[in-house]
Amino acid sequence: MNFTSPDPVSTDSLEVLEKVIAEASGRSRNEAETRHKIIDFILHSFLAWPRNRVAVEENIHPGYADYVLKKANGDDWLFIEAKKEGLYFELPVPNNPDETSTFVAIKKLLTDDNIKAAMEQVRRYCFDAGSEYACVTNGHEWIFFKTFEKGKRWDALQAFVVRSLAFFREEYTKAWNNLSYIAITERSSLPTLLASAPPKDRGIFYPKEKISAYSHTINSNRLAGALRPVINHYFGVIGDDETEFMDRCYVQQRDYENTSQGMRSIIHDSLSPYFAEYGVQQLQDTGKGGQLGGRLTKNIKLGRRGEVLVLFGGTGSGKSTFIKRLLHHKPPQWLREHSVVGIVDLLETPESRERIHAEIWSGLVQSLDSDSLLKGDRAELLSGLFQDRFQTARKQQLSGLAPASESYNLKLNELVESWRGDLRYCATRLVEHWKSKGKGVIVVVDNTDQYSAPVQDFCFSSAQEISSTLECVTLISMREERFHNSKIHGLLDAFQNSGFHISSPRPADVFRKRLQYVIGLLSVEKAKRKVMKNVDQSIVEDSKVYLTILDQEFASDRSPLNAFLSACAHGNIRLSLDLFRSFVLSGYTNVDEMVSKGEWNFLTHQVIKPVMTPSRYFYDERLSDIPNIYQIRNNRHGSHFTGLRILRKLAKSIESSAPAYVSVAELLSYFADTFNMVDDFIKNLDVLLKHGFVESNNRVDAYSEEVDQIKITNYGVYMLNELAYNFTYLDLICTDCGIYDEGVHNYLIEAARKEYRHFVRHERLKRVQLRLERVEHLLEYLRTEELRERSTYSLGMPEAEMFTQKSALTFGAEKGRVLASAIRNQGTNSVRR
């Protein structure tokens, strides 16, 4: 809460407070005097509680509550039990001599008999009245506490303790922001103050904000200049005219299933229960389009008209590639002979309904006019496509004009141009043209999943319009979450069981086929000159060696490169290809040493850094595809471990390779009851969804009220079991992580500055030694935080289950290898580690 008193305590009140403190030093008043001289002043004069909202000596069977702060509707809000000032409350020793307030576990407070009797007395009053908050005071010490909390032992809760009246003088702002009438009634301060783990007003410090070289970039590796166009082309989208590339590198579902047998540890991209309920079928692609190819073929054979089919798949799952292969590059023979396909690709079309609508119809006409009928001369158009309108025009617009006259021809030319510009009419006539040749029409509206939900709905409506107007089969590709979002708002009620879900292939299969294809091109003289123009032969040969080494890595399921890219790109081959391109071209990838040896076994650290920060010296979560799992995401009340705790809860639902979906409400309740970290939970879950650590049952990829069930993905398992404890990962995220301890924050800043100086001077060994020392400091800090949270939240978990215990063990095993590698290679100028 960041607010201060609209009417600051007057000078007179401060003077009275000083007198009250001075007069109370003897602690000799009875209960009535204590109330009149001290408590009344603090509550009504100092904290501005109006007397007409405070009941005094209210009869609560079997006794009396001394003060009861009332809500506007008359319900009880806060009970205060007043004791005489001579009754001492024995409190734990303060952390420092100047401490005037603190948080103390109720269990510890109850060891004092006077406190125990007072707290239990007022707690009985609260139970009878249904009030959650209470306070006991002798005028000097004030103990504010919750009387109950669902799912937790009462004595495990924390109480806010005012150690002396000096608190109201020395920490006036805190007193006002938490205990004043406005704070309690208008700002709901008590739920925050007395939460299971109340914030300690801890500041958060971000090292990267004080590191001057934080935005420094890293040059690409030696082969990157020659390889960049090759990598960008052959590890990107397959073009419409690249049939050989498509045929050689497409990964069929059958290939995927064969290579996945026996890999029970991999959690595969699959059809979610939500879509199974709508009758969406899991597509089993055998090379001829599976069920979808069969459905299209049957529709054309039987002359079915007006149907819209939907191809579902996650982001980057390969929907566009599947469609292009099925209908453009290698269609089944019957479809090739008896159908015409119009593919409208909206990938480059801006998010404007007008632009999209125009692009759909113009693209449709262009793709259907494969015989260039619209480019024919006027006579051909009038006797062919435009015959119907020409006959009508002769009876109407052209009536009375001599066919040989200038006015007739000018008018006819004007009409022909208007008909040519009527795209809907042209599309209809082109469909009729193909029907006359015994061919049905299939229209594809692709790459609509880039748009926001309302525009996605518009695209679906446009697909229905096309299907109805042209009486053809229309296929539209959509992401599951967009369909879900539209369905729950009633926008896609016309959708009936005509959906097919495509699962993404295994990244290793995609990479191996493409790598082998490129290596083959570089091995053929004619193809090589086309692929790598004006490139020195030695660079070409080195590139072949480099790509061959990468191909060998993807042949092994134990390869860190294979495991990392497969895990990070769960269900998203597009992302996997993006990460691979960054890795291949990164200056952190030591191609010289790899090429000189002719073979290479990648270590985990040699993969993580090029992928997480391919072109920058320091990691920045905002610019990386790999998030910081330890980031504090709620400035008021957050934890370094919320993301990992979510993943661990979900990992417990894994049975074999099929994790169960878990209720988000159940998880939210756990984090609210255990940690009081609702906002932190929501922000972490949003990050986990966006990056694919977890998956919702409706494939919504950001947190919203529509996300009701989630499960962990292979990426989430990889982060939970391996990546979060890796030396290189910890080393990268430490300077981009919010830190509660200012001393640790200052250390990380200075360590980063020294490390950068070592980098500039090519002092490899010193740089690695400093990084090892830095991660040790980070782990010590994180361990302190985790131990504090274990105590604060009464987690009761054994030390062996702590995240930082696993980090320490992993780091201990890695430290020797990392240092030995640095010593062995200290003479090189490479930045790869």
Image (cartoon, rainbow, N blue to C red):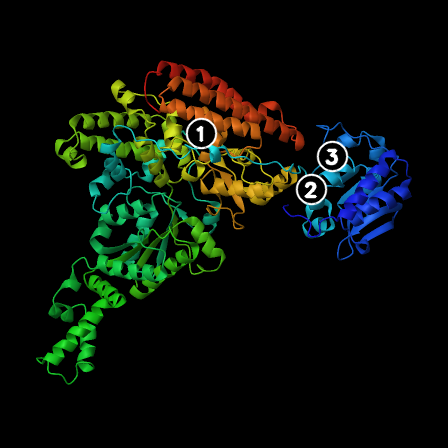
Q: Which mark is residue 721?
A: none
State which mark lies toward you, 2 or 1.
2
| Image height of 293 relative to 727, above or below | below
Provide the residue designation for mark 1: 732
Amino acid on which disc 3 is placed: Thr
Horizontal side of 636 relative to 132 (left or right) equals left
Residue at horizontal 85 percent and vertical 42 percent from the top: 82
Give whichever of 371, 252 is nearer the camera.
Answer: 371
Residue 422 is situated, as x and y percent measured from the top left of the image, at 25, 68
Mark 1 residue crowding within 10 angstroms, few (<14) / some (14–19) / many (20+): many
Q: Which quarter of the figure has residue 126?
A: top right
Horizontal side of 801 relative to 688 (left or right) equals right
Mark 2 residue crowding within 10 angstroms, few (<14) / some (14–19) / many (20+): some
Give whichever of 443, 104 is nearer the camera.
Answer: 104
Identify the secondary structure beneath mark 2: helix
Which one is earlier in the sequence, the residue at label 2 or at label 1? 2
Amino acid on which disc 1 is placed: Leu
**Residue 794 can be seen in this image:** no
Q: Which quarter of the figure has residue 260?
A: top left
Horizontal side of 598 relative to 748 (left or right) equals left
Q: Are marks 2 and 1 in contact (CB under 8 Å)?
A: no
State which mark lies toward you, 3 or 1.
3
Alpha-carbon span between mark 2 and mark 3: 11 Å
**Residue 519 can be seen in this image:** yes
Residue 86 is situated, as x and y percent measured from the top left of the image, at 88, 35
Which one is earlier in the sequence, the residue at label 2 or at label 3? 3
Residue 48 is situated, as x and y percent measured from the top left of the image, at 76, 50
